Structures are given as structure tokens and as C-alpha cells.
Amino acid sequence: MMAALALLPLIAQLAHQPFWLDLATRLVILAMAAASLNIILGLGGLVSFGHAAFLGIGAYAVGIPVHHSIYGGASWLASDNGLFHFALAVGAGALFALVTGALSLRTKGVHFIMITMAFGQMIYYLLESLETYGGNDGLTLDVRSALPGIDLDNPAQLYWLAFVILAGVLVMTWRLRDARFGLALAGARENARRMAALGHDVTRIRLAAYVLAGAICALAGALMANSTAFITPAMTSWPRSGELMFMVILGGAGRILGPVLGAGLFVLLEEALSSFTTYWHLPFGLLLILAALWQAGVFTTRSGGART
Amino acid sequence: MNTALFVTQLVNGLQLGVLLFLVASGLTLVFGILDFVNLAHGVFYMLGAFISASLAALSGSWPLGVMLALPLVALAGAATERLVARPLYGKSHLAQVLATFGLILLADALAMLIWGVEGRTVALPAWLQGRVAAGVVELPVYRLVIIFSGLAVAAALYVWVHHTRFGMLVRAAAANRAMAEALGVDTARLHAVVFILGAVLAGLAGALITPITEASLSMGSDIIIVAFVVIIIGGTGSLKGAFAAAMLVGLVDALGRAWLDDLFKLAFPAEIAETAAPAISAMSIYILMAAILVLRPGGLFPPRARGR
Amino acid sequence: MNDPLLRLDDLHKSFGGLKVSAGVNLAVRAGETHALIGPNGAGKTTLIAQIAGELRPDAGKIFLCGRDITRLAAHKRARLGLGRAFQVTSPMAGMTVLDNALLAVMAQMGSPLRMWRPVRGEAAMVEEARAALARVGLAEVEEEKARDLSHGQRRQLELAMALAGRPRLLLLDEPMAGLGPRESRDMVDLLCGLKDHYAILLVEHDMDAVFALADRISVLVAGAIIATGTPRQIRADAAVRRAYLGEEDTPC
Ligand SMILES: Nc1ncnc2c1ncn2[C@@H]1O[C@H](COP(=O)(O)OP(=O)(O)O)[C@@H](O)[C@H]1O
Ligand SMILES: [Mg+2]
């Protein structure tokens, strides 16, 4: 699967289908975002429903400096340097995750779901209120991030960059799953109370995962901004978080390549269904309901899945 | 900030507060009693709005439209409870989240199919259109009607929960699920009643707000997060908490929008105040939520230890 | 050293109107096996939970080696040397026996935030986890999922995890509960081997085991300690006989 993805720009070029490359770029960036969510949701078992906020944070970490570099103002922030953008995205994502994670992790279960959702929506309303940056209408990036040796205006190069970062993220998830951190996360997912009795600071472990995931997802957001060259607060609205969650579940929560599979299926489904009807959310919603009922074992056994 | 503006914003805040209470009260009971995450609760709010608007247009009478809409919303609630919610009681929160998220997509797509992407407005009957003088300001009659009907519903709920046998069972179940089951309560019926009641209350809120704003596709997803904030602040499963928190959130939101601007202009240069004030007021209720989480993680009226 | 290892000073805890600890005073000395007995519902498990830091007492103080730990979080107490085996066995059911033991060892061995090196490659840690499993006789099943173990084996795993943290004091809540006669005898042998190396606070209903293992016994009835003494003194104590031992033939 990864090999096919690696060769995609060549295939798209040979088949004279530049659209495929757009689609594949979207897939790779979404897969990166889903892979970051997989760390908290899949490995950590925490149902976090505000993950799209990090996409928006990363995107505006590109959009805002670019905006100022062209239209002036806020000289300390104005820059078209891609390295600065990416560092800003990662830093802001991690910081937001640290603060909201520390608060959200004081609670569990249903509360945790609602609170992550609320903090995610807070970012949405915050971005919407920033009239300087287009408010609700969003921001068009007049230039892309400038990187040494890589031209992001070239779709194939943008794709390669995203692909390489995705591969890095996947390798990292794979390594950390089998390292101390992954074991501790799994232990906390299975039985947090027992973990505390053993001497583990469960909150700290989970917070570390939350911050790591937030930073990675913000990086995905920075790439997404460069890919679409147009960003809006809608990137962060909570249905986007739901879609990311759908990708993780569909690909198999906790599986290393699951997010790629999930993102692939999501992009294809979206493409196929939406070309067939503008009401594609109708079959998609139905599918989700059936998948959830199936996942809970409603159609087969009477036993439930793991509780959060 | 003058008195007239203050009174107007106070009334706006109270109006938002009672509507939030109508949406959140059913939701908090469903969380408390069923431990069920219903992201799709906002759907009933939207349905109440659209159905009442359509029926008002058909019948030529808005009050009649609202009267007829509520049983239909109840029907939608009953169907949802039976087909999606009930199979997932006691299952993983993740499955509940996925299923109800799918339900939102499905319902939104259906609503788009039936009512189109444009919103629906309704005209109030003449006798509701006037204004009344209240000291320095004139207030729209209809806003006062919303506030008083909301308060009346809250009072009726209070009486129902505290002075009827069925209400006592509801309270017992919200405080301690296992206990209620041990007492031999017909839980299936209790669950269905609570769920449908919640749907009707949300539908009523949707119907009431339509003459002021309009019935729109996104209204359900917008209100649900704020309702979550109300529940987190109030404490899961507590009607008292939902009421107090709804009023608090309504007032903070309305007064924040009016006051922060002035407040910031006192403290900061105009340039900063112009960006910061709207940004902070967009986030005010989430900041309130964060503060409550720090001070009282269980909310204002935390649930007692639950036997499970 | 005058300070006892663990000292409970006038501990109070209620659930609503129910007093589960009504002024508990108790000292566990270094090296001793101290049994805590009492009828079902006396408040033994809730007392252990307060010592371990899972429940906060309403009033009173808890000292470990003279240090006030009353307000310390559970995981910090564990790191100070409180090892706990639960009454209801609760290893991480979906993980292997070895992973469970590794988690126990890891809690005492530096940061859990290492993200690159595979745990199974950390020789010192794996060795120590295996040693803990071997001590309770679980070496053979280290790759099995905890949920696939027999009840007796899960109890042993529970104990191995408490041991793996090299505790100063073991809190054992009914390690014999639900075991068959044979398994019970194995467990008593195992605990006999441990009692020379660890201080133990042992909650147990099986009186043969208690009298075989304990250096001292405290009797908890309705949230209060009504007697503390050697097994001999306890056997002879009239109040204890009335309140507790007399009921022995109506098992709880
Ligand atoms: N979380 C709780 N909430 C309310 N009551 C509890 C709770 N935990 C224990 N109890 C009650 O406290 C009493 C003591 O329980 P416990 O400590 O488990 O007794 P023991 O271990 O001595 O059998 C029992 O009556 C039990 O029902
Ligand atoms: Mg007990």
C-alpha cells in the first residue's frame, strides 16, 4: 500500500490524471492527521473528539505569517519561511494540546469526549472571530511556504514531502507502540486504576500522548494549508473531527497502517458518493451507524466492546 | 456601556439561557441515566425548527405549527431511541459517538433533501410582534415570551421530577443506575420516556428560536456543543445544574459580547482591543468551562458516586 | 528506628451515612506480617484503598516510614514502596503476562516516556519482570494473555505485579479468595517464602492461613480496630471471640 502511494505521482503523470495527485495528497495529509489521532484513540483508548482543531492551528500557523509577509503588520510574525511555519505549527499545536489536554484529562469517559469537543469548537469560533484573517470566509494563501530545496508550488514535490513525513510518523508510531511509552499507554487503556497502583502517573502518560498527537496533527494542518492554498475555520469544525475518528476506526484503531487505510477509504468514499449524489452524507451517515452497531456487536453477539 | 444596552443584553442572555436549558436538560438526563453519548441531540432542535416552520406556513398559524410539530419530533425521538440508541446502551462510548455522528450526517442530508439548503423563516402573529416599554428600553414581546415559556417548562420539569412517582424514579436512576435497576424499575420504558422527552424539549427550543433567527441546517451542530459546555459546567445528570449553567452561559455570552469591547479598550491600545475583544468573547464560555474544570472537575452539581 | 513502617492515625471515612472507618489506629512494623481480619463489610478493603491512596480519608493521617502520605496521589505512594494486590484481580486483561509484569517493573525504573527502544530489548527490565513471574511460578505462561489464565494464576500474577515493584510494604487483599484447597496451600507456601523479605499487611478470611502466616493480627469490626495482638492473644481475646471468631461457622 505504501509502495503504491510512493509511486503515485509517476502513475498520475503517466495516466495524465493530475487530479489523482490532488486526491492522493489529500489522502496522505488526512492519513497523517488520522495517524496522530491513532496515538491517543487507538493506542491510548481515549475518545478525543476535537482533533480537527489541530489541523486548523497548523493551517493558520502558515496562513497568518504569510498574510503578514504580504500585507504587512505584525512584523515579528510575518514570514514566508516554511521552516518557521512548520516549527510554529508544531509548537502551537503542542502548546494547545498541553493546556487543553491537562484540563480534559482531569475527567474521563463521556466528559472527556464532550470537553475535547468543546475545546475544538473554541478554536473554530476563535478563528471565525479573527476578522483580520478573513473571519468566516477564511484566508487565501498568496504564496506557499518557502523551503530550501523544495518547491511546494510543484504538486508532485508537495506530495513527496507529505509522503515522507507521513512515513516518518508511521515509523515513529510503530516504534513507540513497542517501546515503554506504548506499553504504558496500553496499560492505561486497559486499566488506569491498576496502573496507578503500580506507580504509574497515568495522566502524565496520556498527556504526553495528547501533546505528541497535537503537534503531529498541526504539522499535517500546515501541509494541508500549502496543499489547498486556502484555509477556513471550517477545517476545525467538529464534524471534521468526527471524520478523522471515522478514519481511525475504519482502518482499525491501534493498527499502525490503519490510518492510511482509513483515510484512503474515506477519500474514495467521499469521491465516489459525492460524484453520485450531492446528498452523499446520507449513505455515509447510514454506513457510520451500521458500522457502529456492528462494532458494538449488536448484530452478532451480545457482549460489548471496551468501555472508555 | 449604558443601562439600555445592559438590559437588552441581559434579556438576550436570559433568552439564550432558557433555550440552552431546554436543549441541555434532556441531554443531561440521557447522559446521567443512560451513560449514553448522544451527539445527535441537536438534530431534534433542528427538526423542531424546520417542522414548525413548514407547518406554520401550511396552516397559516405559527402557534398551531409549533403544537403540531412537537408530536412529530417526539416520533423522531422514539424512532431514534428504538433503532439507534437502545441497541447501544451499555456499549462502548466510541460506538455511541460513531453512531450518533452518523445519525447527524443522515439527518442533515435528509433535511437538505426536504427543505433545501436555504433556511426557513416564519412570521410571528401580530400579537407577538410588539414591544413593551421596560424602563429605559423597549423590549420585543416575543423575547419575553420565550423566556417565560422556558421558565414555565423548567418549573414543570422541576415539579415532575420532584413530586411525581415517575419523576422520583428518574432522579433515582440519574443518581444511581444500578440502584434503580435493583429496585425493579421498568428501565426500558424509563429510558424511552427520558429520551423522547429530551427530544421534545430540544424540538421546542428549535421551534421557539425560529421566528428570531430561522430554521437552518447547521443550527443543530452549533447548539449541541454549547449544550455540552452547559452539561460540563452544571454536572452530568443534574437538572438543577443544567439550569444554573445554562443561565450562566447565556449571560456570559451575551454580556461578554457587549462588555469586553469596552473593557479591552480601557486596558489595551485600540488596535489590540479590536482583535482581542471579539476573540475573547467568542471563547468566553469555553474559558468559563475551563475555569470550572480547574475549580470543580465534576461541575457545579457533581454526580454522586455511581454504583455500576 | 522507632517509627513503624506504616502508621494509621485515627482514620475516618464515611460513605453518606455509612461509617466505614471510625477512627482506625494501626501500626505495621518493619518486617512483620500483620493480618487484618474482620467480618465482611467491616471496611477492610476501604481501609486498604485509603492506605494505597485511591480513597481519601475524611479525617486522620497516614504515615509511611514517618512521612505523612495522607494527601499523596496513589501512584506516588506506590513509588514510595507500597505494593498492592487487589481483592478483585485486575491485571490488564488484554495484555500478556510478561507485559503486565513489565509494566510493574517499569513503574520503578525511570521514565515511561521512552518512545524508540523496544521494551523487550531492555534486558535489565525484562530480566527483572521474568524473575518476578518465576517467583510466583508463572514463568511458563509469560506469553499468554492475562484474561486466558485460570483464576489461581491470575491471583499469582496479581502478586507478581505487586512484588515486581520491590515494595517495602505489600498490601494483600484476600489473596486466597476463590482458590481451591490445593491452590490455597500453594499460595500459603508462597506467602511463607515472601514473609521473610517483605513487610505485609494481609487481609484474609481463611483463618488457618492467617494463624499460619501472621506475626500480629488486628481485628476490624464495623470500622474500628477492636483488638491487636499476637495470634495467641487474639485467639484468647474474649471480645474478638464474641464479635468475630464465634461467627466463623457462618462464612461471609
Ligand atoms: N464506593 C462505595 N460507596 C458506598 N459504599 C461503599 C463503597 N465501597 C464500599 N462501601 C461499603 O462500605 C462497607 C465496607 O466495605 P469493604 O471495605 O469492602 O468491606 P470488607 O472489605 O471489610 O468486606 C460495605 O458496607 C460496603 O458496601
Ligand atoms: Mg473486602
Image (cartoon, grey):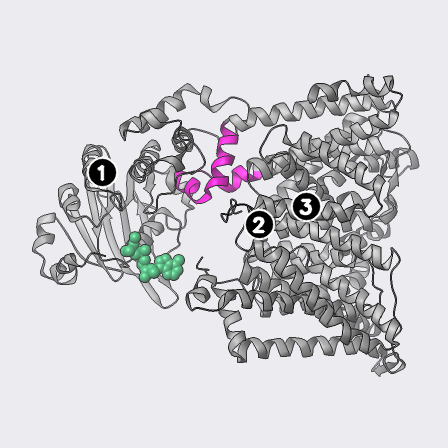
As drawn, C227 above or below B70: above
Identify the amino acid type marked 3. Leu
Same chain for mark 2 and mark 3? The answer is no
Pick the front one: C169 or C205: C205
Quarter containing the N terminus of chain A: top right
Within the magenta stretch, is there residue A181? yes
Residue under the point 65% across and 64% down: B78
Residue C95 badge: none
Identify the amino acid type marked 1. Glu
Residue under the point 48% across and 30% down: C111
* Label 2, label 3: how far apart the Cα atoms are: 14 Å
Q: Chain of mark 1?
A: C
Is disc 1 surrounded by few (<14), some (14 to 19) or many (20+) residues within 10 Å?
A: some
Span shown in magenta: A180-207
Q: Tell me the SS state at disc 3.
A: helix
Residue under the point 65% across and 61% down: B230
Indicate left or right for A23 with B239 as reference: right
- The residue to which callout 3 is attached is A288
- The residue to which callout 1 is attached is C183
Residue B93 badge: 2
Within the magenta stretch, is there residue A164? no
Same chain for mark 3 and mark 1? The answer is no
Pick the front one: C53 or A236: A236
